Amino acid sequence: MKIPTRFKTSIRRIRDVRKYVGNNRTFRQFVNQYDMVYFGKVNHKDEAQLVRGITMSHSKTDQHYCVGSAYGRDMILLQRSDHLLGAQGSEHENYTWNILAIDLKDNINLPHTYIEGRHRHGVGFYAELSMRERSWVELPPHFIGEYSQKFRKNYVVRMPNYYATVFSSIVTPLVGEQLAHYFGMFDYELFDDTLYVYYLAKVPSLERLDYMVKAGVWLASEVEKSYTNNIR
């Protein structure tokens, strides 16, 4: 049976409400598990001071803010949605990221680095990214030749061209191999003293959010150790 157009919008709204209620429950379970605080939505004026990163935009919507500490790390978890113009502006790309922001050691000042799983985003996303990060390049094969085949097959690394030679001193080949093997469903961004872990899903499970925390805490420790030993 064909659904009348006037009902389609109502049905979509009902589905969105169900997803929000389901996510609300999941994120509240998450904060209870880690003894964090659930804020839901935060005043737009305060958002700029909380979680930025490559997905920051004027059109994005943030909700399900969870703030606190876990495993000795200060962190914020939220869900961010955005719609971007696709190829030739003919269609929209809709994204919902679950983002975990973890504080690193003070004054670590890491180069801006983005480790992204291949084929997760569309043309519109990369167009926005190239406009925002004009100095970024995709690291060519010879820069990551010592990394495992799984890492090279599954991930793309982007960072400013003048920092390209130091990537292996921040995320070592061994860490890259473990990242691809155990935590390949996530994307990662490093900038100054913050690590962002990204997971694309409108309705994430509690288990997957918990896994994000484990991945982020592990990677934060490895990056700090590598940075201290190899850069400073």
Image (spheres, grey):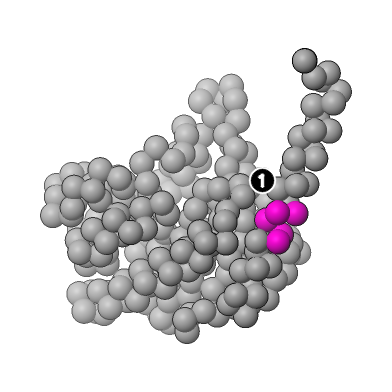
Task: Locate the N terminus and report the quarter of the image it occupies.
Answer: top right
Q: Residue at x 49, y 53 (%)?
A: 199
Amino acid at circle 1: Ser
Along the line of sight, the residue nearer the viewer: 42 or 181: 181
Residue 78 forms part of the magenta stretch: no
Q: Residue at x 47, y 63 (%)?
A: 212
Quarter occupied by residue 141: top left
Relative image position of residue 80 (x, y in whole percent): 62, 53
Relative image position of residue 130 (x, y in whole percent): 43, 42
Quarter occupied by residue 120: top left
Residue 13 shows in this picture: yes
Residue found at the far top of this picture: 2
Near mark 1 (Cα within 10 A), the count class, few <14, some 14-19 or many ≥20, is few
Describe residue 87's horizontal placement relative to residue 111 as left or right: right
Q: Is the magenta stretch mostly helix, strand or loop?
A: helix
Residues drawn in magenta: 21-25
Residue 128 drawn above or below residue 144 = above
Relative image position of residue 10 (x, y in whole percent): 84, 33
Residue ID for mark 1: 59
Along the line of sight, the residue nearer the viewer: 60 or 201: 201
Along the line of sight, the residue nearer the viewer: 32 or 108: 32
Task: Locate the C terminus and report the quarter of the image it occupies.
Answer: bottom left
Describe residue 194's horizontal placement relative to residue 5 as left or right: left
Quarter occupied by residue 39: bottom right
Describe residue 50's horizontal placement relative to residue 173 as left or right: right
Relative image position of residue 19 (x, y in whole percent): 71, 48
